[in-house]
Amino acid sequence: MELPGGVVTPGVDDPRERLPLLGIPDDLSGLSVLDVGAWDGFFSFECERRGAARVVAADWFAWHEAARGSKRSFELARAALDSHVEDVEIRVEELSPESVGTFDLVLFAGVLYHVRDPLRALEAVASVTSGRLILETHVDLTLKRKPAAAFYPARELGSDHTNWWGPNPAAVEGMLRAVGFEDVIKVFPRSRAYELARAARRRSQQGRAVFHARRMLRT
Ligand SMILES: C[S@@+](CC[C@H](N)C(=O)[O-])C[C@H]1O[C@@H](n2cnc3c(N)ncnc32)[C@H](O)[C@@H]1O
């Protein structure tokens, strides 16, 4: 994460590499944003920088499980950036209009494969989305056209026991529609040719994908 004074924090992941893939609009003026699974807040601070009127960073595990770090990095970055990003300590399954309200834009990056029950998590995410969802996730079985998901009961993915599921793109799209999202599109990777080339190059059907979807709240 880049902080004032030319400081770039060390870390295990560089979200600057994923930022262009997410397709976050350049101008978020006036919008409310919820960043679910915000971790150290990289995408939350980026949305604030793009003009969002209100940004809420939501997380729990990374802020409370010692093995995953603590909330101190998020708080340090918020202070260094003189940021007004709010924080809420909540698990994705507990999101609801009553607990956090609803948001024009919801980011759900790098979390779907960590939840034991992805449909239940997406239902909760849908309930707090009054506009657009941007979902970024690990995907598996990418060459299968029918909806399918790989199950990782132990540490099969990245030696991380909190990785449970590797849905393929068709499964992610299907789940998003099943919980009420419309206009579901995969924005990365865009083409089947890219997916085929990636699988051949890596000899693996695993990768990352980004989806945009909308939820219209009907009155
Ligand atoms: C791989 S990190 C992704 C962080 C950030 N969104 C990004 O894309 O760089 C996964 C994050 O999801 C959070 N997480 C995992 N399970 C969660 C759950 N059930 N509810 C809320 N957050 C969860 C973790 O605490 C962690 O911050």
Image: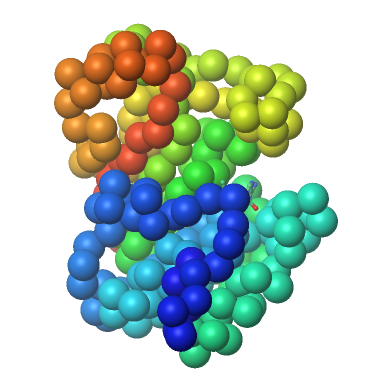
Scheme by which the image is coloured: rainbow
Residue 202 appears in the figure: yes
Residue shown at 34%/77% (left/top)?
49
Quadrant of the image occupied by residue 169: top left
Residue shown at 53%/50% (left/top)?
13
Which percent across, then down, holds residue 101? 49, 69
Please, is residue 209 above or below residue 15 in the view? above
Quadrant of the image occupied by residue 120: top right
Q: Residue furthest right?
A: 66
Q: Is residue 27 left or right of residue 49?
A: left
Q: Residue furthest bottom?
A: 82
Which percent across, then down, holds residue 24? 28, 59
Please, is residue 58 above or below residue 206 in the view? below
Please, is residue 54 above or below residue 143 in the view? below
Residue shown at 22%/62% (left/top)?
25
Picture mark count? 0
Q: Is residue 86 left or right of residue 128?
A: right
Please, is residue 29 above or below residue 210 in the view? below
Quadrant of the image occupied by residue 172: top left
- In the picture, the quarter occupied by the C terminus is bottom left
Q: Is residue 182 left or right of residue 157?
A: left
Which percent across, then down, holds residue 207? 41, 28
Q: Is residue 5 left or right of residue 117?
A: left
Which of 127 and 160 lies nearest the eye of the viewer? Answer: 160
Which of 210 and 132 lies nearest the eye of the viewer? Answer: 210
Residue 124 appears in the figure: no
Residue shown at 33%/30% (left/top)?
173
